[in-house]
Structure formats: structure tokens, C-alpha cells
Image: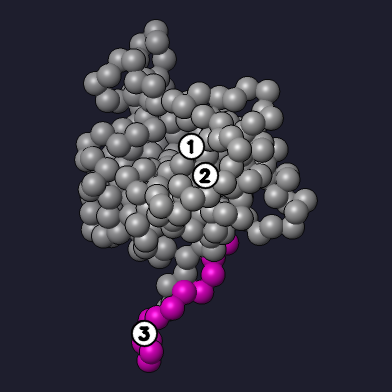
Amino acid sequence: MREILGRRRRLGRRGGSARLDAALTCATEWQWPVLPGAGLREGGDLGRRCACPDPECAVPGAHPFDPGLLAATTDARMVRWWWTNRPTAPVLLATGGRAPCALSLPAVAGARALAALDRAGLRLGPVVATPTRWALLVAPYTLERLGELLYAQDRVPSSLRFHGEGGYVVLPPSEIGTGQVRWERAPERTPGSRPKGAAATPVVAPWLPDVEAVLDALVEASTSAPDGGSRLTH
């Protein structure tokens, strides 16, 4: 029994280390503000439940709790402190501002949209997949710009969600109530800029497409999906 428990502890440390590494990469290399998600806890006969106080939490583990969303940061010391104290906490990206934004849709529709975008020869950025929803990360957009693009659409399905200023997306290798979070399309690292004459390694950040380039395909895929999904399903 001692060996089995020891093995579980080692596995837990590796899982926590992976989340810390992912959070540090986002915060320090890519300058994406992150914070820990609520995470999961054992719920007895009910299985794993959200660690927040709400027994009916609609998005177990996959939302900010303590600290709140406004605490998202790129500070390495804060990131280390968070994930040292809560090594299995999900990694949340605070979207908007200078950080990436995202569009998410039910998993079936997400697979259809990616196939359509690939056929069109469009270059995609990172795509996050959970068992129920996929999220395409895009370059930052304003609410005004998004409103103009949506106004031009005949119909926008309620299952298509927009993660801009004040929003968030769960990043791999997190685990949430619906299961494991993974990269369906891994980030492509591209050289960033650095001050002239600086000797440090240039900052690298994943390439991101413009929201306009992917919106039509996502609307079409969401409209034609057999199950339009739920606004609260992650």
C-alpha cells in the first residue's frame, strides 16, 4: 500500500508541475495573464465536484473562484506561489486587452469548423479542446469590432460563445468537471520583438488569426451542428 500511495503522490507532483510549467510559459514567455481555476474536489458518491461552495456549479472546476478574475497576472512570482499552493488547479487565461481572445463552440461543431477552415487553407492559431467544447484563440478584438462582425451575420447561434474583455478560457493541461483539457492545435511559437541592442532571448508568442478570418466558419458549423450545445456547457 505504501508503494501505491507513493506512486500516486509522485504522479500528483508531475501533474502539478505540468500545470505550473504551462502557467509560467503563458505568463512569462507569451505575456498572457493567467490565474488558477476553482479546481475539483472529491464529492463522495457524487464523484468529483467543483471546489467552489456552489453544489450546483454549472462549470465545475472551470471558473475563477479565489482569487477572482481581476487578479490574473504575468508575474512569475505570483504564478509560482499560486501553483505551489494549489498544484492541481486549472490554468485560466484571462482574455481580452492585449491578451488573446477566443471563440468557443460545442465539440462536434468545433471539429466541423476546423475541417472547413483547413479546406479553405486558412492558418489557425491554438485550439483548446475539452470533451464538450472547443475554443479557437484569436488576436485581441474589441466589443465594437465584434459587434460589427456579428451584425453582418444573418444568425448567430447561442451555442457560439465569445471570450473577450472580462472573459476567460481554460488552458491545457488542466482537468475540469467534464474531463481533461488538451490542445487540438498546439500553439505555434513565433519570434517576438525585443528592445534594440538587448542581449536577452526574444520573447516568443503563439501566432493568432484575426477573428474575422474564422467567424463565418464557426457560425456555419454551430448552426448546422446536430446539438447546438448549451450556453453553460464547457
Q: Position of residue 176 (x, y in %)?
A: 43, 30
Range of residues picked out in magenta: 188-200
Q: Which residue is mark 3?
A: 195
**Residue 118: assigned label:** none
- Amino acid under label 2? Tyr
Q: Is residue 12 in the magenta section?
A: no
Asked whether residue 218 is in view, the answer is: yes
- Amino acid under label 1? Arg
Asked whether residue 111 is in view, the answer is: no
Secondary structure beneath dot 3 equals loop
In the drawing, does residue 140 fall left or right of residue 39? right
Q: Position of residue 141 (x, y in %)?
A: 44, 55
Q: Mark 2 or mark 1, which is nearer the start of the sequence?
A: 2
Secondary structure beneath dot 2 equals helix
In the depicted structure, whether residue 224 falls above or below residue 174: above
Q: Mark 3 or mark 2, which is nearer the start of the sequence?
A: 2
Q: Position of residue 39 (x, y in %)?
A: 34, 32
Residue reaching furthest top? 45
Q: Which residue is mark 2?
A: 151
Q: CA distance from mark 1 to mark 2?
A: 15 Å
Q: Which residue is mark 1?
A: 161
Q: Nearer the viewer, mark 2 or mark 3?
A: 2
Q: Nearer the viewer, mark 1 or mark 2?
A: 2
The answer to which image quadrant residue 25 occupies is bottom left
The prevailing secondary structure element of the residues shown in magenta is loop
Q: Which quadrant of the rendered structure holds the N terminus?
A: top left
Task: Tell me what residue is drawn at x 27 percent, y 43 percent.
Answer: 69
Secondary structure beneath dot 1 equals strand
Q: Nearer the viewer, mark 3 or mark 1?
A: 1
Q: CA distance from mark 2 to mark 3?
A: 40 Å
In the drawing, does residue 209 fall left or right of residue 165? right
